[in-house]
Image (cartoon, grey):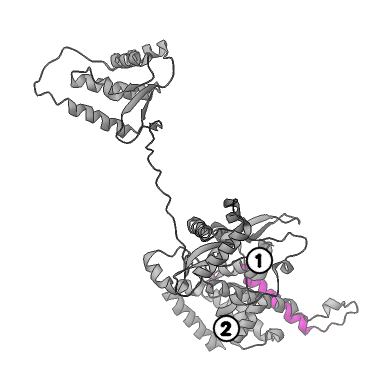
Amino acid sequence: MASDLEMKISNINAISETDYKVRLDLFEGPLDLLLHLIKKNELDIYDIPISTITRQYLEYITLMKELNLEIAGEFLVMASTLLQIKSDMLLPSFSEEVSSDLDEDPRAELIRRLLEYMKFKDAAIMLDNRDLAGRDLFTCKLVEPQPEISSSEDECLEMELFDLIAAFQGVLKKHPVDTFHEVTAEAVSISERITEILTILQGRNSLRFDELFRNSFSRENLIASFLAILELCKLKMVRILQTGQFAEIFITPAVADTDGAFLSEVSTLYV
Amino acid sequence: MSNLKSIVECLIFVADSPLSFARICDILSEYDKEHLRSSLIELLRDYNSDERGIFLSEVAEGYQFRTCKANAEFIRRLVKTTTSKLSKPALESLAITAYRQPITRAEIEYLRGVDSGGVLRTLLDKKLIKILGKKNVPGKPLIYGTSRRFLEIFNLRDLESLPTLKEMRELEEAGIFEQQQELPLEDSIENRFPPDLPAVTGKD
């Protein structure tokens, strides 16, 4: 028996060195181990020789100890259950108060559990053998369609900053870089442009992006205007809308009335 | 009525999960139920002939177009397998849940003889099982059942079409294990449910 045990240890050692995982799920639990022992010894599940099974079961636990494996509590519970069954079978029941359920084979409960467990082991295999969707059978997967860009004229899109920059570049192109290094005395302040834009916007609902740059002569002025729009956006005083891709960009006041006090605050920031 | 058949075909094709007959009736409320039923039956007949690569599957209490198993190897070259392999403990726990639902974690652990908390968490994460509620016993343990997704993944029409445990044993002995799903059923799911708990179907 000792040599048999040693052989098993060496076997398991060999396996654990090459593929630790395989060995780990060898036995799911005590019931799995018991079923394995029953099968290996070709025992009748309805008439388990408890002493044989118990001895082999304990051998396995010793083996696990020798391999420094952590033995799950369940294995030890089963070991004590087996020992209890063994002692129950050894002891003659001489008590008078023996009720009908004590007359039952002490192994009955264990056998029931083993049979039940066996059923579910089979069921698990059956489930795995089915044609699984995503493994054996496939379904068509629709990719979520991209939201379509609306072609309708009256629907406005909220603008991205980059669209705004692109539009600004379009304006800049119309005004080529001045090759003369003119020193202009005129200083364009952003706050001035903010006030200007707001003034233009006061009497109307919207302002075309192009319109803003119509009267601008210098690049400085253009840049100041652009920064003014960005600043107004940041302050949530205007909204920038576009009806479609590459369409005209409109600037609309975010609120109906602009606050005077608010404006002066802006002016102080950029003077 | 051939037009109606094509409408039903489209609905099933576009739906992202198996489409139930009730849902089809709901969508096509202007059509007669009997006409819808016959269209569906015709569709099933049309698709489920041998030469098709796609068949109309009755799965998870609904209908869905699926590719046939014979071509799986080739399809796997095109698309990744979406169903990750379940471990042995996970499959065991899933099988127990499927056959014994509604079931508590303690009951599963008693049947398996090992702690099953982690495995149940995995199954919940994969949406194969779901929490049905709490059992009205001390401690109010959670009760688990299988989800609609379980039916979808495991190619089951409904819970009743799970082969019974008894059948599996007999089949295994007879050596025709692979053909189990075609067999008639003796043991209905209601019989397996304790009377104090409501029968649970795969409905979400």
- Name the chain under label 1: B
Percent position of residue A111, x then y: 71, 79
Residue B160 visible in the displayed image: yes
Which quadrant holds residue A41? bottom right
Q: Residue at the location (57% across, 83% down)?
A: B176
Asked if the magenta segment contains residue B15, the reply would be: no
Tag nearer the camera, 1 or 2: 2
The chain containing the residue under callout 2 comes to B
Q: Residues within 10 Å of mark 1 (few under 14, many from 20)?
A: many
Viewed as shown, does residue A92 lie left or right of A261? right
Task: Please indicate whether residue A249 sits to the left or right of residue A36 in the image.
Answer: left
Residues at marks 1 and 2, common chain? yes
Say few, some or many: other residues with alpha carbon within 10 Å of mark 2 (under 14 / 14 to 19 / 20 or more).
few
Residue A222 at x, y = what percent? Answer: 23, 22
| Majority secondary structure of magenta residues | helix
Residue nearest the observer in this picture, B169 or A81: B169
Amino acid type, callout 1: Ile
Reply above or below: B8 against A69. above
- Residue B164 circle label: none
- Disc 1 versus disc 2: distance between alpha carbons? 29 Å
Which residue ends up furthest to the left in the rendered image? A180
Q: Nearer the viewer, residue A5 or A266?
A: A266
Question: How far across and down, in percent of the image, does residue A201 sit?
Answer: 35, 16
Q: Amino acid at mark 2?
A: Ile
Q: Is residue B180 above or below residue B13?
A: below
Q: Which residues are magenta?
A: A69-96
Q: Give yes or no for residue A71 being in the magenta stretch.
A: yes
* Place of residue B147 in the rendered image (x, y in percent of width and height, measured from the top left): 60, 59
**Can you say which quadrant of the picture contains the C terminus of chain B?**
bottom right
Of label 1 and label 2, which has the lower sequence position? 1
Reading the image, the residue beneath label 2 is: B176
Q: Provide the residue designation for mark 1.
A: B108
